[in-house]
Amino acid sequence: MGKQLSIDDLLTPVAIIDETIMETNVRVTQNYFDQIGRAFRPHIKTHKIPSLAALQIAFGAQGINCQKISEAEVFADAGFNDILITFNMMGAERLERLKVLNARVDLQVVADNPVVVEGLASRFEANQPLKVLVECDTGAGRNGVQTPDAAVTLARQIAEQAGLRFHGILTYPKPNSESDVEAFFAETIRLLKKTGLECPVVSHGGSPSLFDSELVKSATEHRAGTYIFNDRSLVRAGLCALDDCAMNVIATVVSRPTETRAVLDAGSKALTSDLLGFPDHGLLVDYPDASIQALSEEHAVVDLSNSKKKPEIGERVRIIPNHTCVVSNLFDRLVFHRDGVVTRIEPVAARGQVV
């Protein structure tokens, strides 16, 4: 029997996933949605790995959420059938691929404006219609119709197209805005009923809103992705503790040019420049008073001014990313472990699928 591979044997920088923490995150989240009687649809953009989506389904999730058609195609090839794509689908080539995908799986998409609806309607026919949800801006300030009246107007436009089926409404909310989301949803549903339109799906979303989902009474499902790994942003939001973060990036100290500066081998290609409102680029687990102040492509510059203990050259350090979803997309593979012993190495199958 060969020697077990330890995470200490891995070349750095490397993204590692603690299997036990990850499984606990999946179980706890699914238990919550089972208890409140709501469907849960995980967003696979966090991990982009079919075996992890299969784990989420095995625990009780209903279907998956993808962000781009290229992601959805990877997961359809892996055998997943119930797929929601939460991005406006535009462009002739993309619409043709969408039509092919719709013939293979139970597919849903979103739209928040008439141009998108017209494009979808030009490609789909009554013999194989496409399910479309109206995306609503309930306060996040991103995509979405701005009022319940506008949602109903767009829903009617969808319903009038022979190749489309109005399938419901959807939002990605601002955190801690459950009352606003519920007010928007409830009024939209009321107006839809008045118009004579059924609304099968009312989809709420986001990991920051995860355990407040029950406050949105009208919702039929919740979508979230980051929860499977958790990250520094969710710790800040009070959704988890540092010990609930399954992903770490291991880096090596390659230089100590001054007493107050260290340089790591994990730059923007491993840690992402996505700050998410933090003043630095991730949390050094064993040096919490140190600060990763700057990233170049291959280097992370760490300010040690406020840290009493300081890492040595050659030392390996663990970093909890600010935003785990982006980090997954930076690596060709993720390394999984239990108690530091490597259990498997998984290719990030949908890495780079951005169209």
Image (tube, helix red, strand yellow):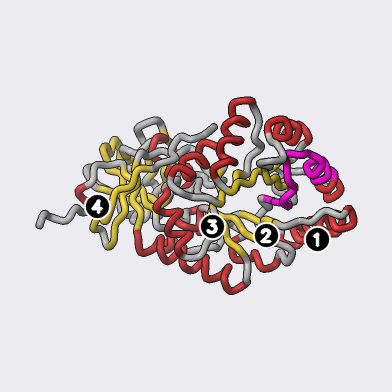
Q: Tell me where residue 1 appears, x and y as whole percent.
A: 9, 57
Residues at marks 1 and 3 touching, judged by CB atoms closer than 8 Å: no
Tell me if I can see residue 322 in this picture. Answer: no
Give whichever of discs 4 and 2 has the lower sequence position: 4
Give whichever of discs 1 and 3 has the lower sequence position: 1
Q: Pointer 2: what residue?
A: 176
Q: Pointer 4: what residue?
A: 7
Q: Tell me where residue 95 appears, x and y as whole percent.
A: 62, 31
Which amino acid type is shown beneath numbered disc 2? Asn
| Badge 3 element | helix
Q: Tell me where residue 270 appears, x and y as whole percent.
A: 38, 39
Q: Tell me where residue 351 appears, x and y as whole percent.
A: 43, 38
Residue 295 drawn above or below residue 180: above
161 is within the stretch colored magenta = yes
Foreground residue among 301 and 274: 274
Give whichever of discs 1 and 2 has the lower sequence position: 2
Distance of mark 1 from mark 3, alpha carbons? 30 Å
On the rendered structure, is 147 left or right of 299? right
Which amino acid type is shown beneath numbered disc 1? Ala
